[in-house]
Image (cartoon, helix red, strand yellow):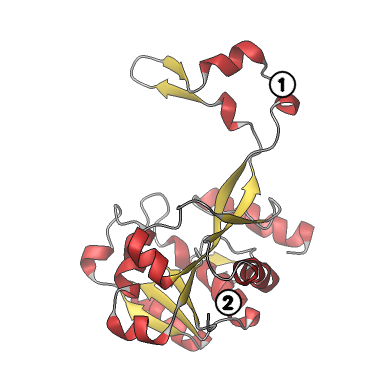
Amino acid sequence: MEKKALCFIPARGGSKRTPRKNILPLDGKPLFSYTVEAAIQSDVFSKIVVSSDDEEILERSIKLGVSIDERPAQLSLDTTRAVEVLHEYLSRESIKKQFNVAANLLPTCPFRTADDICNAFDIFWKYDAKYCVIALTEFDFPPQLAIKLEENNHDLKMINPSQFRKTTRSQDLGKSYHPNGAIYITSIEKYLREKTFFVEPLKGYLMPPERSFDIDYPYQLKIAEHMMKELNL
C-alpha cells in the first residue's frame, strides 16, 4: 500500500466538563497545540488537519502551519463522538482520492510524542496496513474488580461477581490495558466500512502512563504542568 497518511485532530471548542478545554493554556501554550506539534515533528503525514467549530482554535491551527476544517454545527454537540466527525471527513470524495490511511489524535493527550506516532506507524506498516493500531496504557487498577454504583439507592453491582470469590489481589489478576486516546491508525477504506477502529483483529502500541495522561478536568491541567516540570515531559 502506498503511504499517503492523513492526520485528523478533532478539537471542538466546547466541552461539557471543561469549557473550551482544547484551547486552555498548558505551560503557556494551548492544550491542542502539543498534539499538532507532535504530528508535525513525526513527519509521517501528507496532511495534518484540525477539525473545530471554534474560531480561535482554527486561527491558531493556521499559525501552526496545518490545515483546518470548520466543523458543521450538527457535529459540534456535546453528544457528538469524535469517530462520527472523522467518518464524515473521510467520506468526502476529495479526501478518499488523496489519502488511504488516517490517524486520529485526540488533543487532550499532550504528552504523546512524535516518536510515539512513528512507532505506532511502524507497527501499522509491519502488518501491511491490514489492522487498526491503537495506543494503549496499562490499567492502574484491575478492571475485573469494577463495581457499578446506583447513586439513587446506594446499591452496588459487581461487574464480575465470580472474581471477587476467587481473589481481589491485583498481583494475581495479570495486566490489562485500555486505549489512551493518543493514537488511532487505520486504513480509510476499512474505517469507512466499519465506522469504528475497534474491529478484531487489532494491534496495539503500548505507552507508559505518564505519556498517556489525558486531560478532561481543570485540575488535570495543574497536574500536567507539574508533570512537565518534574518528569521533563
Give amino acid for label 1. Arg
| Residue 12 in view in this figure | no
* x and y percentages locating residue 187 in the rendered image: 46, 70
Q: Is residue 147 above or below residue 183?
A: above
What number is the disc on residue 125? none
Q: x and y percent of residue 79 in the render?
A: 29, 52
Label 1, residues with CA under 10 Å away: few <14, some 14-19, many ≥20: few
Q: CA distance from mark 1 to mark 2?
A: 40 Å
Q: Left or right of 221: which side holds 118? A: right
Q: Residues within 10 Å of mark 2 (few under 14, many from 20)?
A: many
Of the numbered discs 1 and 2, the one sitting upstream in the chain is: 2
Q: Which residue is painted at 65% across and 66% down in the image?
A: 123
- For label 1, the residue is 169
Q: Which mark is residue 39?
A: 2
Query: Is 175 in front, or is 41?
Result: 175
Residue at image position (75%, 61%) is 229
Q: Check disc 1 and report its element: helix, strand or loop.
A: loop
Residue 228 left/right relative to 187: right
Which amino acid, by three-letter code, is at mark 2?
A: Ala
Q: Is residue 112 left or right of residue 17?
A: right
SS at circle 2: helix
**The C terminus is located in which quarter?**
bottom right
